[in-house]
Image: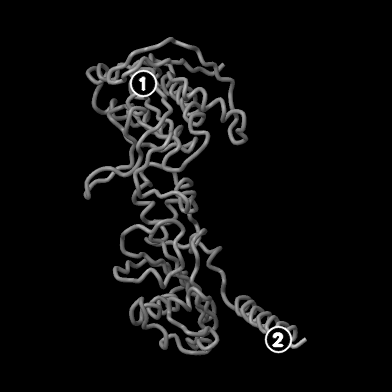
Amino acid sequence: MEGKEDELTRLREENQALRGELASLKSGIRLSSTMMTSGGAMTRATTIGYSSQTIMGLEELILQLAPDGTIGYLNPPMAKLLGVPSRQKALGSALDDWDNGPLGKGTLKAVVQAALSSDKPITVEKVFSDLDEKVLPPAKGKRPASATILRFAATEVKGRVELIIQDVTRLRWLEETFARYVPPEVIEQMMTRTEEDFMNMERRVISILFVDMRGFTKMTQSISPGQLQQMVNSFLSNMVKCIQNYNGTVDKFVGDEVMALFGAPIKSDDHALQALLTALQMHKEHSSMMEQWAQDAYPSPGIGIGIATGPAIIGNIGTPARMDFTALGHTVNLAARLCSMAKAGQVLTVKETFHSASQAMKHDATHTIPSIRFSPMGEQRFKNIDKPVTVLSVREE
């Protein structure tokens, strides 16, 4: 009986503590998740799809202050950062008593004072070169070998201030590395993929697409630079839109040629199907553009597309001053050769793409899949490709 009574007592105490935290939260100012902000720091976040003061998916370190500057609430991660031995001990104490830890003396007070003097929520990010990551919540996924970046968001309501800290180190690394290649939604997905290490090179089966305009080099000799710029920019914009519609990665532009990856940096089981659907949409978009060019008395070249599926080495390659995410290997070369072979209006691929896409079609519940016809074109030999390749022509019926 004595053991049961002790257990009941412990449960009552825990329940009372939870009730106290809930009351503190209800009487506080948990408004930041619905508030919009402006300014440099928030503008950077909204460019990748975030529209609130805090960033969804990242753990929050929360501190609430009463109008007299004393602590009304702090959650366990914030207590760990500030070195608070007991959260109960910190309640009612002055912020100054704890604002001298690993973030540096007066860091939190400065953010709080900025919020008190502003009629808008305050958001700021600061780099901490020597901060021990052990004082922060564990990162989702591997932490990059760079200085820690913390995001401070402070909101004031009737003299009460809520301060939230988030570790945005990995997010900013993903933005800096991949924002040129993938749409904002993909970066958000990457933040949650803790099982994937985007920092290392690896060998992976993916699908690679090349597309370019037929007769582009000859065309450059017959139109003005201004016309050429307008045509190429319109073409590239349309192709990128198609790639991003199917979660592809824009690898690079080489003149009028576009290289795209499917299944990297984020793994997917339907990368071959994504590449094929992209190619079909590209032809539709480009056909409309060709009609507009013809009306404007511009040249209206068609496009050729090559898609290959197979193993490739993917990752960041380059120098310390310039790194690019790309793919290397036989599959890349094959996709480029198929693109060169394709006539205007054609999509050429290989049997590996056909088999992979066929499997994905059986289980796909995401895309509206058109009727796709694959027509064999026999075996073809390509430069720097050792064995003959069975080539298939793809079109939508």
Q: Amino acid at mark 2?
A: Asp
Q: Percent from the top left, x then y, of residue 14? A: 65, 80
In the image, residue 122 sits, relative to residue 9, either above or below, namely: above
At x 56%, y 30%, the residue is 360
Q: Residues within 10 Å of mark 1 (few under 14, many from 20)?
A: many
Which of the numbered marks, if any, corresponds to residue 250? Answer: none
Query: Residue at (27%, 45%) from the top-left corner?
Result: 323
Label 1 and label 2: CA atoms lie apart by: 75 Å
Q: Nearer the viewer, residue 80 or 202?
A: 202
Query: What residue is shown at x 35% (from left), y 57% (from top)?
Result: 144
Residue 368 percent coordinates (x, y): 60, 30
Quarter assignment of residue 377: top left
As drawn, the label of residue 339 is 1
Q: Is residue 229 left or right of residue 245?
A: left
State the residue in front, 8 or 141.
8
The residue wearing badge 2 is 6
Seen in the picture, residue 306 relative to 379 is either above or below; the reply is below
Which quadrant of the rendered structure holds the C terminus? top right
